[in-house]
Amino acid sequence: MSYLINIFLLFVIFFFSCATSPLKSKDIAGLKEDVSQLQIEYRELKQNHADLYAKVDSYASMIDILNANILDFQNKISFLSQTINDLEASVAKTKSEKYDGVLLPSSLYQRAYGDYLTGKFELAYSNFKSFIDKYSNAELAPQAQFYMGECLYSRNMYTEAIVDYKKVEQNYKESNFIPVSRLKMALCYQKTANHALALKIFKSIIRDFPKTQEAITSQEKLKSFNNNVQKK
C-alpha cells in the first residue's frame, strides 16, 4: 500500500514538472513502467480481496455444517436416551409396543421427527405439540419444543417461531438446545428487521455460551452486521 502511495506522489510531482520542462523519452518509459507496476499491484490487491471473501464464505458454510451436525448429534443422543427409558417402562408394565393404548414417547417423537424431515411441517408441528402435551418432562421434550419452532421457521412464520424457541429456555433451563434456540430466535428477529433485538441475542450467546458453535456463528453475524453498517 505504501508503494502505491509513493508511486502516486511521484506521478504528481512528475506531472507538475512537465508543465515547466519538456518530456524526455526515458521519463515516459519510467512512467510507463510505474503504471505497469501499479496495474500489477492493483490486480494482486483485487485477488487478495476476492480470496479473503471466499475464505470468509467458506468458513461461514463450514460453521453452518458444524452447527447442523452438532444439532443432529444432540438429537440422536436424546432419542436414544428416551428409547432406553421407554424400553425400561415397557418391560416394567407390558411387552406390547403401547402402554395404556398410548404410543411410547420415543415412537411419538420419531413420528413427528419423520414428518419434519420429509417437509410435512404442519403435520410435524401438530405431532411435536402432542408429544409436549403428553410428555412435557420426557428426555426428548426440549428438542420437541425446539422443532416446533423449526417447523414454523421453515414456513417463514418467524414471529410465531420466536414463541416456541423462547419456551425451550423457559421450560427446560438445563437443556443443550438453549444455545441453538437463542440463535434461531436472533435469526427470526433478523428476518423481521428487528436488528436491535437480534444483536442483543447474538451478544448474549457469545457471553453465556462462549465455547459453542452458536457463539462462533453469532460472532460472524455481528461482524457481518458491522461491515454492512460501515458500508452505509
Image (spheres, helix red, strand yellow):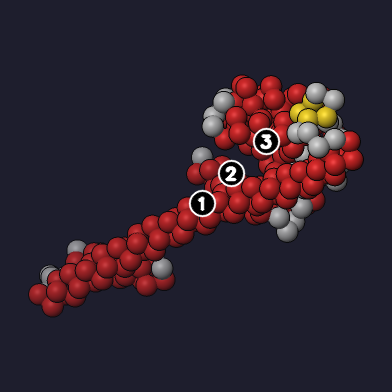
- In the figure, is residue 164 to the left or right of 172? left
Closer mark to the observer between disc 1 and disc 3:
3
The answer to which of marks 2 and 1 sits earlier in the sequence is: 1
Give above or below for 154 relative to 44: above
Residue 228: horizontal and vertical position, in percent?
A: 53, 43
Q: Which residue is mark 2?
A: 225
Any part of residue 122 in sight? yes
Any part of residue 188 in sight? no
Q: Which residue is mark 3?
A: 110
- In the figure, is residue 108 to the left or right of 15? right
Task: Give SS at disc 1.
Answer: helix
| Residue at x 46%, y 59% (from the top left corner) | 55
Graded by Cα atoms within 10 Å as few (under 14), some (14 to 19) or many (20 or more), the crowding at tag 2 reads few
- In the figure, is residue 57 to the left or right of 150? left
Q: Residue furthest left?
A: 25
Residue 92: horizontal and vertical position, in percent?
A: 89, 40
Residue 103: horizontal and vertical position, in percent?
A: 76, 28
In the image, what residue type sits under mark 3? Gln
In the image, what residue type sits under mark 2? Phe
Residue 116: horizontal and vertical position, in percent?
A: 60, 32
- In the figure, is residue 49 to the left or right of 176? left
Q: Look at the image and tell me in which quarter the N terminus lies.
A: bottom left
Q: Quadrant of residue 153?
A: top right
Q: Residue furthest front?
A: 95
| Residue at x 64%, y 47% (from the top left corner) | 72
Q: Nearer the viewer, residue 99 or 139?
A: 99
Task: Give SS at disc 2.
Answer: helix
| Residue at x 76%, y 43% (from the top left corner) | 83
Q: Which residue is mark 1?
A: 61
In the image, what residue type sits under mark 1? Ser
Q: CA distance from mark 2 to mark 1?
A: 17 Å
